[in-house]
Image: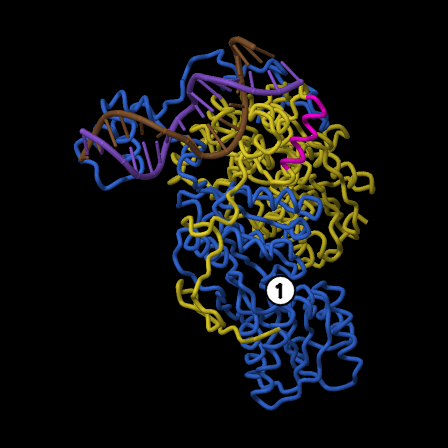
Chain colours: A blue, B yellow, C purple, D brown
Amino acid sequence: MSEDVSATTSTTGSPSGHSGGHDIPRRWPTGSLTDAKPVPTLEMVAALAGVSRATVSRVVNASPKVTPQIAEVVNNAIAQLNYVPNRAARSLASRRTQAIALVVPESTAKLFTDPYLASVIQGIALALADTEYTLNMLISSDTRAEKTRRYLLGGNVDGALVVSHHSGDQSFGHLGQSLPVVFGGRPLLPGESSSYFVDVDNAAGAAGATAHILSTGRRQLATIAGPQDMPPGVDRLNGWRRTLAMQGLDQSLVEYGDFTPLSGAAAMRRLLDRGRPIDGLFVANDQMAAGAYSVIYERGLTIPGDIAVAGFDDNYFGATSTPPLTTVHQPSHELGAKMAEILMALIEGKPAPRVTLLPTTLLVRASTG
Amino acid sequence: MSEDVSATTSTTGSPSGHSGGHDIPRRWPTGSLTDAKPVPTLEMVAALAGVSRATVSRVVNASPKVTPQIAEVVNNAIAQLNYVPNRAARSLASRRTQAIALVVPESTAKLFTDPYLASVIQGIALALADTEYTLNMLISSDTRAEKTRRYLLGGNVDGALVVSHHSGDQSFGHLGQSLPVVFGGRPLLPGESSSYFVDVDNAAGAAGATAHILSTGRRQLATIAGPQDMPPGVDRLNGWRRTLAMQGLDQSLVEYGDFTPLSGAAAMRRLLDRGRPIDGLFVANDQMAAGAYSVIYERGLTIPGDIAVAGFDDNYFGATSTPPLTTVHQPSHELGAKMAEILMALIEGKPAPRVTLLPTTLLVRASTG
DNA sequence: TTGAAAGCGCTAACAT
DNA sequence: ATGTTAGCGCTTTCAA
């Protein structure tokens, strides 16, 4: 805990008060000042192993037609030299980049702190970590859209993964025609499309939550739905409707929000103001549920006593609320992994389903009694 | 909202019930089935512009010694052909990758949902988005450490950014000798080191929060400190001590936690159990503060009536608590940007400070009256 | 200021 | 099974 480091403002170049300040003893080869480690090439391995470069290449690429004997020798040389293939050269020669782009629209990146998204990205990164693919993360924005397109189409990656919250984001809609692309998180495209995407089964999740509320004996169900121009908003509402329809129950207690707590509160207010009895509520996401909670308490009602509430997302909102919120958990991690898996299949020319819907799981907590 | 998409389990290859199922009309050039767009090369541009490849290269790289006239012509050709330089070829020839690695230790990635980390990463990505650098994200783990090292040292990137929560993570400590590396988020290394890193000024932030509590007239200050094997834990405690020392106040009311809510609650209990009066409390992070809150209420005390409380992090914990928590906000976004900035300077051979401490800002809310 | 030519490190036919 | 030989698309001396 040596505390001799003085606080420095963010001005670049201002040397810290630390010892050694700015005399930068760069060790890495900026010029060719040091001839320390000449970065071994395939050719050097070949020389040391006494074989041709082609053979080394074959060994490196695990070609079946190499005598174990020779392979052994070559591998030794590789180990001895600490050889690592140069990616650029490999790409150039093989015309494959072994790289995958992760495109995050900037509008979405703003919500990067959304644990759901972070988790999806993590799933992607982890799935790719054990493959030969590299992950190139790009934040695209309206102003950078062209640059992004060029990058993707410029042969810099073998395929792209797009995560986004917005259905309006058509920038990458047509991309799929020139490059393998898998959309995820939320499908960007309205209905039938020729893209590949993987998403969570929103409708089924909502239906399950609704069914659970019914199972507690409630019959006057309301819902706070999400924006109807966003697939999750639409699908979750449909799931709720589907379940009520199956029981022949009334579906008129619907109000809409925009996924924010505030909008959830407002919707709840409108719902209650209708003056009709409500004993069960499905909210399209946990944040709106948080808003609904406050209004319910405001009106002197209890949860789950008067109204059973279920949400969707499995947020900290739901986890930390009082009472803890029954909610639909999304397999965000798996979703990311699935996206990566499908993209790799596509890149390798294997068949893959255009639409993959991942099952959700219902987290039953105290809010539904 | 066409709902004709049937839910599919995660089994790859299982075609969705959707129209068009698995007949995959791949458009992108897998073989050379379609000779649609031959991907323009620099050579083609040269031909169309009627100049040499060297000249095109100069134009593309904005070399000063090109006649505006010629440049004009070349640029037109570029636009017309929609030419995009091939990164691999460029790297191979120039021996620079224009790529930067973002290394996230897997142990840290688990906490990827930590908004702080996500924000740092976002800052990095955004800062890089407007440069020519590409961001390669790798999740490293103990089992993959060697692979990661090889990747970094194999000339695949021009430099690396390492974000981590752990001070024990020495895997990348020596990397800085062969490759420009900037550590961030939390410094990995104990004290004096030869690495570059940027961090938040934890001590100053803690000192500021403590000073603020004192400014409300409190004099019996306690603190719930973080783990003393983690720099933030140490520094925040030091900040608290420093401020009290300046006022000649007692510094014995210290209990430790591990940054979790539970540990915060336990520490608060121990603090209260000492039987000494406490009217002010600085907690090393918001999560522990949440734990402290519950215990304070449990004992029938009020905030800020009986005890003024301040935290550190600017979490949702602090924002949604009752009363809202006064806390220290960290410029996580800027931290990421700064890391990128310093690394780029390093790569380009420019001098840069070894240690950069970013200032925090105090968010005064109701918990400190 | 511009062009010619020689690679960068590797893969992939084609030979042997 | 292994070696030979061309490039992959670009940058970069070196001449002109």
Measured as percent of width and height from the top left, residue B111 is found at 54, 48
Q: Which residues are magenta?
A: B67-78
Name the quarter where the N terminus of chain B is drawn.
Answer: bottom right
The structure residue drawn at horizontal position 43% and vertical position 65%, both measured from the top left corner, is B23
The structure residue drawn at horizontal position 79% and vertical position 49%, both measured from the top left corner, is B365
Q: Is residue A109 visible?
A: yes
- Compared with B226, B347 (above or below) is above
- Compared with D16, A243 (above or below) is below
Residue B351: name its quadrant.
top right
Query: Is B121 situated left or right of B302 in this image?
Result: left
Indicate the secondary structure of the residue bearing disc 1.
Answer: helix
Measured as percent of width and height from the top left, residue A116 is found at 58, 57
For this rendering, which residue is in front, B95 or B147?
A: B95
Asked if residue A350 is among those painted magenta in the image, a careful observer would answer no
Asked if residue B75 is among those painted magenta in the image, a careful observer would answer yes
Query: Disc 1 marks which residue?
Result: A318
Measured as percent of width and height from the top left, residue B171 is found at 44, 31
Main SS, magenta region, reads helix
Q: Amino acid at mark 1?
A: Gly
Q: Is residue B159 visible?
A: no
